[in-house]
Amino acid sequence: MSFTSSLSLTDLRGQYMNGSLTPREVFATIGERIEQYREHNIWIHTLTATELEPYFLQLEQADINALPLYGIPFAIKDNIDLAGVPTTAACPEFSYIPERSAFVVQRLIDAGAIPVGKSNLDQFATGLVGVRSPYGACKNSFDPSMVSGGSSAGSAVSVALGMASFSLGTDTAGSGRVPACFNNLVGVKPSIGLLSASGMLPACRSLDCITIFALHCDDANTLLAVAEGEDATDAYSRVNPFANQSRYYGTWQGMLRIGVLPADQLAFFGHSDYQASYEQTITALKEQGAEIVEVDFAPFIEAARLLYEGPWVAERYIATTPMIQDNPEAMLPVIQTIIGGGAKSSAVDAFQAQYRLKALRKAATSVLASVDCLLSPTAGRPYSIDAVNADPIKLNSNLGYYTNYMNLFDLAGVAVPTGFTASGFPFGVTLIGEAFTDRRLLSIANRIQQYFHLPLGKDQGAFQPTTVSPIANQQRIAVAVCG
Amino acid sequence: MSFTSSLSLTDLRGQYMNGSLTPREVFATIGERIEQYREHNIWIHTLTATELEPYFLQLEQADINALPLYGIPFAIKDNIDLAGVPTTAACPEFSYIPERSAFVVQRLIDAGAIPVGKSNLDQFATGLVGVRSPYGACKNSFDPSMVSGGSSAGSAVSVALGMASFSLGTDTAGSGRVPACFNNLVGVKPSIGLLSASGMLPACRSLDCITIFALHCDDANTLLAVAEGEDATDAYSRVNPFANQSRYYGTWQGMLRIGVLPADQLAFFGHSDYQASYEQTITALKEQGAEIVEVDFAPFIEAARLLYEGPWVAERYIATTPMIQDNPEAMLPVIQTIIGGGAKSSAVDAFQAQYRLKALRKAATSVLASVDCLLSPTAGRPYSIDAVNADPIKLNSNLGYYTNYMNLFDLAGVAVPTGFTASGFPFGVTLIGEAFTDRRLLSIANRIQQYFHLPLGKDQGAFQPTTVSPIANQQRIAVAVCG
């Protein structure tokens, strides 16, 4: 093994710049780790030496100064296209070979990043567990008996176990956040349309986001800056407002007012360790000077239930047509059951649910306006793979308690680790804000991550912040008033 | 008749202020006109002397300086609630007596306005013609053999014939604009949510707007300022951004760049007079210095077709449930046919149509960004009542060619008269902009109205502008550059 650092962007780039490391060496080590962790069911396809060679050759003729992601290895959830490599969505019969890479993938490659492979997921991105795959249940990076979280299962675990510097996931119900929580990663669920969804197989096309898993917030901001950009071919793509550009990362300083759930709206589903971790997080933030206020999460929780209980399942039906009509047996039974339900709703049902959502959103708007951000547990608890296999629908549903409303409400979210349970399992919280507050949330997440200063991923080294951002900034500023 | 002026706000208020006129005198004249024009089928209910008395008593004890709409008579489309008076939606079996007035109605009354009555409409606001009513076809103010336009038929005709200073309509497909065009009025179709829809019977709840018919833009701005305001009880109500507040009316000056349809996208359905009126309007604007550019209206025209051909009819079905299910014979056959179709679509249909709409909207966004506003004919042609009765669906559909997309695209619109045909029938255009450009559009409409300087309504006197706003402002401004 030719290097001992983490795969974080800042660590790798330093070594590439001073010539002490090459991308080929990094990929040799990644190849070893892929073998080492094969039982984790992380990958559906890893790029062969032949497939990787053009990337190396390209970089060897390039100027590293012109490529912000020079030689950075990344994983791609296998519902996002990489040209020439099959996209399966964890359903082999569905597989196709795309001619073009997804808009976001191409931007990352153009900046020098190198794909490691296509990562395992809950079939058709329908799930939050990571076990719903014919390629095997993806195992947690900290405890292989536990779920990885999903649906972006392999994307998260590959970063936590040092096979990629970052990864692309997708998030419709919480798939870019729950696996971040269970694998000690930062998970950025950007505002809808900040990252183009062109080349992503839709789950619910009106709600889908491509997401980023990274070891820390500094990396996440750099990656977002490369990946984002309006795409004229994606109807849901939007222009990023000036105040949310990458230059504003780190500028959201000063006192923080954070909204949290009142005790009777919290749910840990019997998991006292996660409850304790959450309480420790809140206590620490208070001690560091953040103002913690209880706000009413009821509209968020009701909206969360609409995602699978309401007509939005029809979008999953559309995304998997014609297979769901012509060859449903090619799907896992649990996926077939869920998505098959999407044909049952009427347009009347759809509009009535949208009316209810609109009313809930109005209530949520007032809540959001009262704080710098909201904060909730990212997940109420983790589950073992065996437990999920024994009760696949209900336990999966529990994992969406804190996440399913987010895209229905058109919000931004950043999942950030804040501790470990007594048994050493990772815990984290999600910061929540209005659409296009991504940089504000990342800035606050960075302050939180700096304070807790946890080791990165699973044994991926220590966190070395590039800036100093305390949670509370008590400095008074002298203001000269003229007039 | 105790006064000879128009009923415009500025005219009435001046006489009220100097004591030469009282609201009782105005209503006496209005009562005469109601009798005079009874054959026009304008009203479903007019307030009795007993019903009016409390309004007069209230004003007689009030300070006119505190009431911007002191003694201003207005008509209310009969799908908007006035406390204690039946709301019929032009369907007697549907009728109910509301306990509270609509949010907007109450604001107008609180500002001193007095309701004249509830005005006739296409049943359940489903139509653009004004003939689909068991209370009789509403007759055009200029030519009783012609349609008034609808669905806000009586609201428009009552203002044009001097029975109200202004009126409230509603607009889902074009009902606040087409009748303005056919009756020589300004029709403001505000941004969705600028005026609360609480107390309005929904047509398509996600698209509905309460609208204002007025004699000129100055009145319309004053009325909008009174009526607008966020309503916590209406999920579709929105906060008006600073740049769209009433103080900005009149400030949109300088050179104008106006987008118009290329010749092959215009449709006049064989009506050479309207085509000539439109061409004269464009020629005049060019001569006055406006820059006229052709833009691609194809996405607008395709979206317009989605409104009645797509799943949004399900919203009308929801709005008329349970009647459409339990007692459809209580509806006019044409309405029953249209709304009954709303039960046929699936949620899959609904989401697929929303995807298509989103793609069209993205194309429209680029078009809108290239100009100060768009301009189209408000309607391609008028029809006689007999013609519409002979072919009720198709001719109605033709009237929506330039209007049906507007609320699906979440745009603002202002219809403004620009001329008369050779036979003396009114013609007008609609200015179109992004949501919350209402004051910009009204400012431009005012410049256009000042230039054409048409008489108001049907024989409601001459237009007396309170400001001077030429179409093109060629003045050069001296700028000192420091640096």
Image (cartoon, coloured by chain):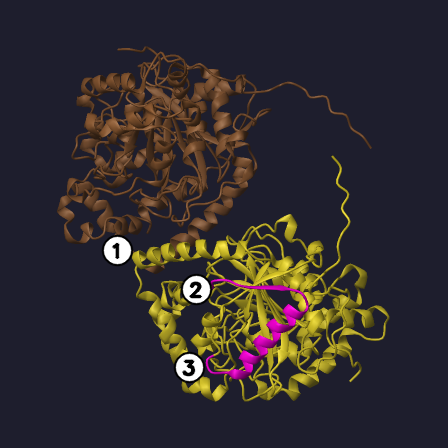
Chain colours: A yellow, B brown
Q: Quadrant of the N terminus of chain B?
A: top left
Q: Nearer the viewer, mark 2 or mark 3?
A: 2
* Nearer to me, A36 or B108: B108
Asked if residue A415 shows in the view, the reply is yes
| Residue where numbered disc 3 is placed | A392
| Residue where numbered disc 1 is placed | B344
Badge 3 element: helix
Mark 3, Cα crowd under 10 Å, few <14 / some 14-19 / many 20+, is: some
Q: Which residue type does callout 1 highlight?
A: Lys
Q: Is residue A98 magenta?
A: no
Badge 2 element: helix
Q: Residue furthest front?
A: B61
| Residue where numbered disc 2 is placed | A298
Q: Which residue type does callout 2 highlight?
A: Ala
Mark 2, Cα crowd under 10 Å, few <14 / some 14-19 / many 20+, is: some
Disc tally is 3
Q: Magenta residues, as a range?
A: A269-298
Alpha-carbon span between mark 2 and mark 3: 26 Å
Residue A454 picture location, percent across and down: 69, 77
